[in-house]
Amino acid sequence: MMATTQTVAWVARGVLAVTSITYLAAGVYCLARPDALRTGLGLTPAHAPARVELMAVYGGLEIGLGLFFGLCAVVRGWQTCGLAASALTFGALVAVRLVGASVHHAFGGQTLAFLAMECVLGAAAGVAWLWRVLGRGA
């Protein structure tokens, strides 16, 4: 049974909304609790510029991505681009995290948890993107 264009659009919006919320929550958390980066991730920047960099990347960039994916979820015609961007972003995160974990022998619980989340969200975005492109639900 073929999915309707409306169903494909709702799935795309749902995947993008979950991605948006994930990035926004992570970004706001990292800005509100910068010490969590030190204790949770073991990042201990010694100088103020390094702390600013962590805030910009873990806070600002993630909030920016969250806002972008949120716009893609609600602006008509942006879903296909947003899904592709999400799939590529999560795909790159997974690839680099796997390489880093392999090189540094860091396949602990936290790494595996991030990998699982990134794989699920990336696969969901990729499947929804393919569904839109191949089903012409764009």
Image (cartoon, grey):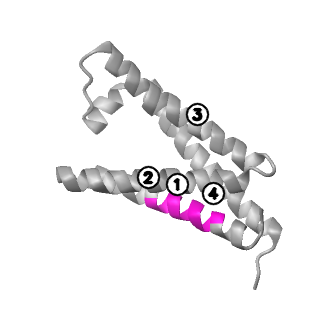
The residue lying furthest to the top in this view is 48
**Front-most of residues 124 and 134:** 134
Rendered residue at 45%/61% (across/down) = 119
Gap between marks 4 and 3 measured at Cα:
17 Å
Amino acid at circle 1: Leu
Q: Residue 46 vs residue 36: left or right?
A: left
Rendered residue at 43%/33% (across/down) = 58
Q: Which residue is mark 1?
A: 88
**Dot in front, 3 or 1:** 1
Q: Which residue is mark 2?
A: 92
Amino acid at circle 4: Val
Is label 2 in contact with label 1 (beta carbons under 8 Å)?
yes
Q: Which residue is mark 3?
A: 64
Neighbours of disc 1 within 10 Å: few (<14), some (14-19), many (20+)? some
Q: Which residue is mark 4?
A: 15
Of pointers 2 and 4, the one earlier in the residue sequence: 4
Is label 2 in contact with label 4 (beta carbons under 8 Å)?
no
Rendered residue at 71%/42% (across/down) = 71
Of pointers 4 and 1, the one earlier in the residue sequence: 4
Q: Residue 6 vs residue 42: left or right?
A: right
Gap between marks 2 and 1 measured at Cα:
6 Å
**Front-most of residues 109 and 133:** 133
Of pointers 2 and 3, the one earlier in the residue sequence: 3
